[in-house]
Image (cartoon, rainbow, N blue to C red):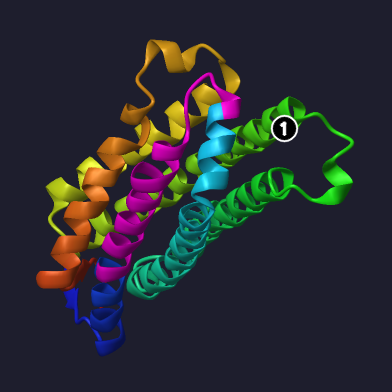
Amino acid sequence: MTISTIDESQRKAARVAGFTCLFAMAIVVFAHYGISSQLMVLGNAAETARNIVAHETLFRISIACYLIHGAGVVVLLTALYVILKPVNRGLALLAAFFRLVYALMWVVIAFNLLEVLRLLGGADYLRVFEADRLQALARLHLGRGFDAYYVGLPFYGLASTVCSYLLFKSSYIPKGLAAFGVISSLWCAASAFAFIIFPNFGQAVNLYSLDSPMALFEMATSFWLLFKGLRPYRKTEPEKGSG
């Protein structure tokens, strides 16, 4: 058993990963729960449309926040790749690819929300449609944004599973925390796939339980990386043959 030292690029990447993950989580929570959810009225497309039109600037801020979140995920996947590349370069690259797919879904979400504003913007060429039809179409695009999130979520869960496994293998963070990451991330990926395949899955399982355990793991890991850093990587060297 040998101990591999942590180089300066990995130390910096650990701090970047810790800060970026916390920042990206905070900004998407603010955008969704602080803005978007406050404007939406369940079962009432007309009232939702009126709220969005009355608070268009706030709605646009939420779109910008979603794009910033997507950019933050790209920064995060880059930092994690730098950290985990010495453990297994192929798996680290696979995790980065999965996380990139998730990041791109936030671009799709932004497109759909901008389309909502276009439908409700009162352009002359839209006057051929009745107001209630435009409101229904706008609500449809809002729903498509949520669909994009749940399409990206399995990829994020898979990315987190691979990263957690590599963190467990390397002992960069406490093994108990890494093991919790593997379990919670696998649960997220499997549940997200089940939600897509089985329409009633969301009625049997609270949808917040899909990604909440994984989010707790990522928050704990982010604080660890930010304030504790990385432990030296322990690896087993092959035995050398005798002379």
Q: Pinpoint residue 103: horizontal percent, then vertical percent.
A: 53, 57
Which residue is the extreme one toward the left? 228
Residue closest to the eye, 118 or 190: 118
Quadrant location of the C terminus in the rendered image: bottom left
Taking the image as drawn, is residue 149 in sight?
Answer: no
Q: Pinpoint residue 221: horizontal percent, then vertical percent.
A: 20, 57
Taking the magenta stretch, the answer to whether it contains residue 161 is: no
Give the residues in magenta.
19-46
Q: Residue at x 72, y 50 (%)?
A: 118
**Looking at the image, is 138 positioned above or below residue 7?**
above
**Looking at the image, is 183 positioned above or below residue 167?**
above
Taking the magenta stretch, the answer to whether it contains residue 34 is: yes
Residue closest to the eye, 184 or 174: 184
Q: Residue at x 12, y 56 (%)?
A: 174
Residue tagged by mark 1? Answer: 137
- The answer to whether residue 189 is left or right of residue 217 is right
